[in-house]
Structure formats: C-alpha cells, structure tokens
Amino acid sequence: MAQLQQAIGILGGTFDPIHFGHLRTALELYQSLNFAEVRLIPCYQPVHRKTPAASPEHRLAMVSKAIETVPAFQVDNCEILRKGPSYTIDTLEHLHKKLPTTPLCLIMGIDALLHFPSWHKWEDILKLAHLVVAHRPQYQLPHTGIVAELLKARLIQKSKDLHETLAGSILLHPVTPLEIASTDIRKLIAMGRSPRFLLPDSVYNYIKEHGTYSISGL
C-alpha cells in the first residue's frame, strides 16, 4: 500500500456569505489537527436548504477574497463546475480520485452530525473520509440511535489517527463558538446596516461593489 500523505480538511457550505465563524473553525482545526491544508468548497445547489441568495459565482469569489492571505486555505470550485445538487459523496469521490493517498477529513458541526444518517449515501461517505466534528458544548450527543452507534464504533481520541488511515473515523474537537449566521449578515446588509467584524473586510467590500445582497434576495 502506498504511503499516506498528510491529511487535509474539507469544509463545504453555501458560504452565503462566508464569515468569521467558518474561517475561525477552519483555522483552529487546521492548527490543532495538523492538516496539510483546509479546502473550502462552495456548493452549487444545497440539497437540504433553499437556493442561496447569491449566485454560485459570487459565493466562490467571496470565499476566494476571504482566504487570499491564508496560504493554508484553498478554495475548490468542483461543485460549482459540476452543477446540479451538491451531494457530498460526489465531491469526496472526485477528491479521492485526485488524491488517492490523502486522508480526507470532512468538517461538520454537531448539528450536521445529528442529521448525518439522512445524507445521500452516508455510509459510503465514511468509506472515503473521516468526520471531524466541530464540537460546541451546548449540543448533547445522543445515547441511542444510529448516530450513537456510529460514535460507539468509530469515535477516536487522537488526531494522529486521522493521518494514519484513509477514512472511517469520527473525531470530536472543540472550537471557539462564534454565533454568526449568514442569514443575519444578509439581513443587516438589506437594512443598510454594516456587518463589519462579522466577516472579512475584503468580503464586505466585494458585496458592496457588486450589490450582492438585497431585500428581494433574502
């Protein structure tokens, strides 16, 4: 078997717009878990949510603006190029073909973990990636059900294990809880109020330049 490369973090989302909650989580996990990089992947069309207010092209551009001074972060446009519903399994299959010896660590919140069994081909996701769960103490882990059984079977305690196998483990890791929501940012902008200090200035400047959000776009 080929020697494994250093694991990378995968953070997907609508990023409508990207904000410091996304970026701080990505940075803390990059530093704590010794990722080679964190790859941010804006979706084209979310499966379980309504159509984003901003176009895929604007959301991709905003992510690029947000991370342009952070070499450890990379933006990946694979879901936008693929178009159609953005299923995580399709993205992981694409990445695994490009990076067959690199462990892929799918970053999610505990709220997403609780709904993970409803994801398309969720069992196959665990064949292609580890799950790294950004843990916030206000969420209680279930004691029964599919997620509880998954944690019992797959939970690991040491981050080095992410680098030593390609997929299949679940790691819970605490992150700084920043209660920032893209919905609230869009509402502030539509009301003519500044969202500064909730998102990078480069992203806010892009929004102002392109008129990305409006009341009708909420």
Image (spheres, rainbow, N blue to C red):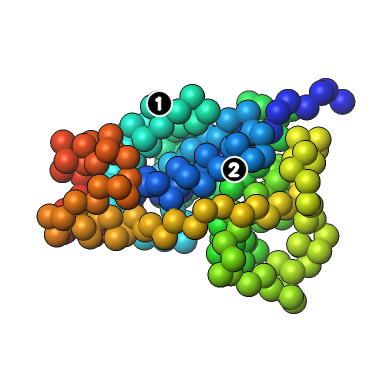
Q: In this view, does 154 lie above or below 201?
A: below
Q: In this view, does 155 lie above or below 76?
A: below
Q: Tag 2: residue type? A: Leu
Q: Which residue is drawn at 80% across and 56% down?
A: 154
Q: Residue farthest to the right? A: 1
State which quarter of the image contains the N terminus.
Answer: top right
Q: Tag 1: residue type? A: Thr
Circle 1 is placed at which residue position?
A: 69
Q: Is residue 21 left or right of residue 126?
A: left
The crowding category of the residue bearing disc 2, from other C-alpha atoms within 10 Å (few below 14, some 14 to 19, many at least 20), is many
Circle 2 is placed at which residue position?
A: 29
Let me know if residue 3 appears in the view: yes
Residue 205: % across, % down: 21, 37
Q: Which mark is residue 132?
A: none
The crowding category of the residue bearing disc 1, from other C-alpha atoms within 10 Å (few below 14, some 14 to 19, many at least 20), is few
Per the image, label 2 sits on a secondary structure element best described as helix
Q: Distance between the residues labelled 2 and 1?
A: 18 Å
Total label count?
2
Choose between 68 and 211: the one closer to the eye: 68
Q: In this view, does 14 lie to the left or right of 213?
A: right
Q: Residue at x 66, y 27 (%)?
A: 99
Residue 8: % across, % down: 63, 34
Residue 27: % across, % down: 52, 39
Dot 2 or dot 1: first in sequence order is: 2
